[in-house]
Amino acid sequence: MQFSIKAVAAILAAITNIASVSAEGATAPEDSAVVKLTEATFKDFIANNPYVLAEFFAPWCGHCKKLGPEFASAADSLVETNPDIKLAQIDCTEDRDLCAQFDIRGYPTLKVFKGEAAPPSDYAGQRQSDSIINYMVKLTLPAVQVFDDTAVLEKTVEALAEPLVLQVLPEGVEKSSSNETFYQVADKLRESFTFGTTSDPKYVAEYAKSAKKPAYVIFRNGEDAEDASVYKGKDIDEESELLIDFIDVESKPLFGEITGATYQSYTSANIPLAYYFYSTAEERDAADPFIKKLARKYRGEINFVGLDASQFGMHAQNLNMKEEFPLFVVHDLEGNKKYGIDQSTPLDNNAIAQFVQKFKAGKLEPIVKSEPIPEVQNSTVYHLVGAEHEKVVKSGKDVFVKYYAPWCGHCKRLAPIYEELADLYEGKDVVIAEIDHTLNDVESVDIKGYPTLVLFPADGSEPIYYEDARSLEAMANFIKESGSLKIDALVDEEDEEEVKETAAAETISETTEKAETTAPAAEADAHDEL
Ligand SMILES: *[C@@H]1O[C@H](CO)[C@@H](O)[C@H](O)[C@H]1NC(C)=O
Ligand SMILES: *[C@@H]1O[C@H](CO)[C@@H](O)[C@H](O)[C@H]1NC(C)=O
């Protein structure tokens, strides 16, 4: 599952970035507030400034050029408002040793230094000027803002740049353990959310219904205060996970937007993701009221998002849909199953509502991507396809499957050994199979790299991932030891010794290639290579 998240996030990030690389320079202009640091000045500067955001960069790097003007503009604005915060640049083509010392592996890398005592942390914000400013200013503030004044709180709620998680404490509530938990969670998640606490009577009356217990409310940026989410679970006391899960689910907008920046947060929420692919802003606006209504109904069960097909339309393929828009598709992330509305008729609201209802009721069939089932098997290696996968791995035989991608070099090197392995089991109750994972969806296996080798024991017990050497002998031994039929193919060989030797000679590196099925060439991060 994870492979596709990473690959898709990479595609989305890459598209976003390439689309808008500016022609301006990576190096801040002489007259900007960005401080140029070198090996000679670095240490003292960090020691003498409480908050430093340092950009390690190379002048030629495209992402650095894009960041450059944003970084300089943030520095210029901070010098006025928060002189304690400094933005600095280190040119890694000039100060190689300094960059090596911080293990810089891609450009640009942004690190936050809070004095010289603590090690730096990675900057985890967006790369726009506003985001940089917000991120750095927040570091200087307490993790939780105390709101004593109704007007200030109301103004904050109206003009949020990110979700606000508010603790509403009725006067006299003595429970300090949940307050401590709230502060701990705030400290942990302060980079992505604003945290506040209040005992304001108006808010207490509105949200802390029981008047004995604290309430937790999430106000989302860009939405009306009436749409705020109120925590209804059990006391958080010392169970910070309860609050974290609540924030994870409820901080998302009712009808959010999928981009390179948001994709990860949606997939980590791990509830089904319902996509509306649109081609124009008008199309999205028209769908907005209806989708929000649905989203309110299925809050916490399904996340609803829009996706701009003019930019990211090709993502439809990952969801087993055709690139014809608008379209509606639900991705059940946990089982990696995709459910799409039939694209042969125009999309309408009723169809969407009914579809989601059926999805919740478990009455839909997923769209399984699959090659056609071969009419004849022409090799001892069984050519498996998505449509047949579940049937074959549960066929009452020990089934050993190789999940591969056509472009993967390690897979190609394994191929001849794998054929030999299949020959060994001809006529026995062991199936040696392979499946091209780029053309076929599979359930019940977690594929993080290619090739992945998995044994499905004949007795139907849990599949076992093969991690050992990719030699004939090692694989055959594994099938004997771990298979439920305990079939030993090697003893039957007349020339066992010879087999062993060939096997040893052909043992290959156990490295697995990254499973970036959808885009082997996409960058994993918005970094240029060193
Ligand atoms: C909540 O915890 C914080 C941090 O420990 C503390 O400063 C604050 O006084 C506590 N508030 C209440 C009402 O107990
Ligand atoms: C085996 O069949 C597949 C189609 O199922 C075909 O693509 C392939 O070329 C055949 N291989 C041989 C060796 O005949």
Image (cartoon, grey):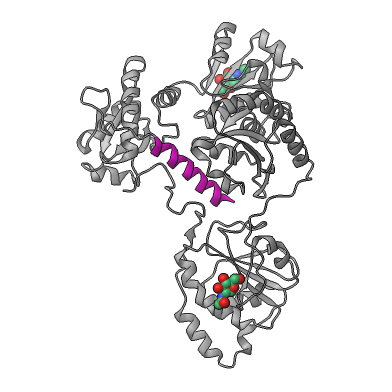
Q: Nearer the viewer, residue 383 or 112?
A: 383
Query: Residue drawn at (62%, 61%), measured in percent from left and top?
Result: 371
Where residue 462 appears, x then y in whole percent? 70, 62
Evaluate whether residue 116 shows in this view.
Answer: no
Ligand 1 appears in which quadrant?
Answer: top right
The quarter of the picture where residue 173 lies is top right
Where residue 232 appears, x then y in whole percent? 73, 26
Q: Is residue 279 left or right of residue 460?
A: left
Residue 293 to residue 504: above or below: above
Where residue 62 appears, x then y in whole percent? 32, 39
**Predominant SS along the magenta part:** helix
The quarter of the picture where residue 216 lies is top right
Q: Is residue 467 left or right of residue 482?
A: left
Query: Residue drawn at (54%, 44%), measured in percent from left and top?
Result: 315
Going by the picture, which residue comes out furthest to the bottom? 494
Query: Residue drawn at (57%, 29%), measured in percent from left and top?
Result: 184
Where residue 377 appears, x then y in whole percent? 64, 75
Residue 27 to residue 220: above or below: below
Q: Is residue 169 left or right of residue 417?
A: right
Segment colored magenta: 1-19
Residue 412 to residue 18: above or below: below
Q: Nearer the viewer, residue 316 or 468?
A: 316
Evaluate whether residue 176 shows in this view.
Answer: yes
